[in-house]
Amino acid sequence: MSSKALNKGLTWGENITYSLGSLGRELSNNCINVFFLAYLNVYMGLNALVLTFAFVIAKIWDTINDPLLATLVNNTKSSKRWGKFRPWIAVGALLNAVTLVAMFIPLDTETTAEGVRYFYYIFMYVLWGMTFTVVDVPFWSMIPTIANSTEERNKLSSLAKLVGGFGGFVASTIGTSLCMPLIAPKYGVKTAYLAMGIIVAILMFCFITVTVLCNKERYKIPSEDVGIKEIFNFFKSNDQLRSYAVSYVLFCSATTISLFQILYIFIYYGNDAMGILDPNVGYTVFTIVACTGQGIAMFFYNLITKKIPREKIYGANYFMAMIGMAALFLVFFILKPEYGSIGNGAARWINVVIVAIAGAFLMTSNGLNQIGSTVMIADVVDYGEYLNGKRGDSIIFSVQTLLTKFAGAIAMLLLGIGIEVANLPQILSQWNPALNDGAGGYEQIADVANGGVLNADSLTILRVFMFLIPIPICAIGYIVYKKKYNLYGARYDEIKAEIERRRAAVAGVAAGEGEGAEVAAEGVEIVESVAPASEVAADADVSNAERVADTAGVDDDKKD
């Protein structure tokens, strides 16, 4: 490949095909985050607290597994044809697709011991997390090897993040608007969930395959292995990293609790205050509006920051999230219609609108937080250089990995406690020969005979854990951010000026070394063989796209 071909910018086709991979990985991620716990707890009858505790342990393992995998990827020899990252992405996508399908195989409750079922599904969850990491780490690490300039990296990562954000909408639509209404009545809910897993797995693999086939690695980037010790040392020495970490974990924990498991409300109480729409359709409407809000916020973020300082936007995220949570908590109280009463239909339509708008507030704040945290993590990297002369880009990114998974673990544990305290019954999918004009069909029945309850109290308990408890968590996160984080305004300008002064001094010393020193400082080598190297250990959170690309781009600019 000629040097001229290597230096040309990314085409729209390359941007789009890379972004489709982001959509694929988010399909898998959202399918499991939204549906898996509900599937096991509501329809398979397994204890939510036991499951979520096991999921927390799995998340802790992920925090160890991610840096190990990143090191393994870094030490992989580059293939001249396929590069270093694409083989990992392809194999990981295949393994993840197979695991995803296996997670929704319904083990027979009568012939399979309960302990065996717990072991099987928990093991599959751990295996899914590991195979997802095999896709995720090299996927985001590949950005600096296919896009050399800051502008290209920002454009690529932003588009990938925007397209990937619709993964939740697509996965939810497949589950609630396709498989549940079309398959569940004829073959049962468990079969519908299995069909959803198969469809999502096929789409995920196809989208990621497009990325692998259509994007070639062209640039070699220096890499560094990241261990737990290095992460701990950076965390200990950087006070702004600690402030950012606490506020970020609290925000993500609160919003994750509310967003990922609102499905429970629609399963058990969707008809209670929104009876105009089928619960499956209602959840789809909620997802469409919520994801649209997130997409708009992410698309116009740069335009918004031209009018409003980014630190104010980031602070406003917390209030937007709390407004959304409060609306979701109150909607069943303020506009709870009585069956047969005048204005019943109007009240239900109002509830549909309020729930959709509340979802938009939550997801918009989530989208703005993702982009805002991207800028903040780059600022924290600069601050590390200001403190001790070490940027530690990949180490900071690995801290981000730990934070995201730690937040997910907190959310999972609180959800498990809430679901268990609410004592919700298992939903049975039973054959009724009288349905469909005598043709028969499956209907869903709450198994209240075995100890579960389905009343206003259990609904209130569920909503307290899903929407009310996250509000003070979010508020504490805002207080920490407001009081402790200060990398913006005049202070940050002073820090950047000092960093540039130091770099200028070093550059003046190095100027006499000739053009070779300048080339070495760039740290980017255009190679004829496809031989990229990983720059970071990326996480399973969609927000790592911009963190990797932006910071890598910032480094290039500052070295020029």
Image (cartoon, helix red, strand yellow):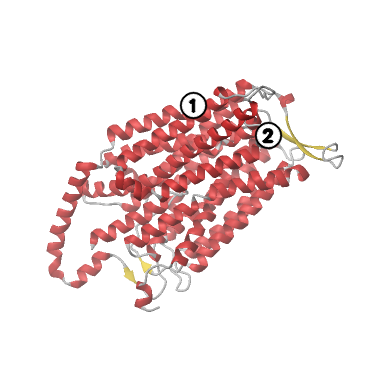
Q: Residues within 10 Å of mark 1 (few under 14, many from 20)?
A: many
Please tell me which residue is depicted at 68% across the width and 40% down the height of the picture.
116
Q: Which residue, as the protein is rendered here, is positioned at the far bottom?
A: 2
Q: Where does residue 419 sit, x and y in percent of width and height?
A: 59, 29
Q: Which residue, as the protein is rendered here, is positioned at the far top?
A: 457
Q: Is residue 283 above or below residue 160?
A: above
Please tell me which residue is depicted at 12% across the width and 62% down the height of the picture.
508
Q: Residues within 10 Å of mark 2 (few under 14, many from 20)?
A: some
Q: Quadrant of residue 98?
A: bottom right
The C terminus appears in which quarter of the rendering? Answer: bottom left
Mark 2 vs mark 1, CA separation in Å: 26 Å
- Label 2: which secondary element: loop
Q: Where does residue 325 sit, x and y in percent of width and height?
A: 48, 31
Q: Which mark is residue 78?
A: none
Please tell me which residue is depicted at 31% across the width and 66% down the height of the picture.
524
Q: Which residue, as the protein is rendered here, is positioned at the far front?
A: 342
The N terminus appears in which quarter of the rendering? Answer: bottom left
Q: Where does residue 96 sit, x and y in percent of width and height?
A: 57, 54
Q: Nearer the viewer, residue 139 or 459?
A: 459
Q: Nearer the viewer, residue 245 or 301?
A: 301
Q: Amino acid at mark 1?
A: Leu
- Proximity of marks 2 and 1: CB atoms separated by less than 8 Å: no
Q: Which residue is mark 1?
A: 468
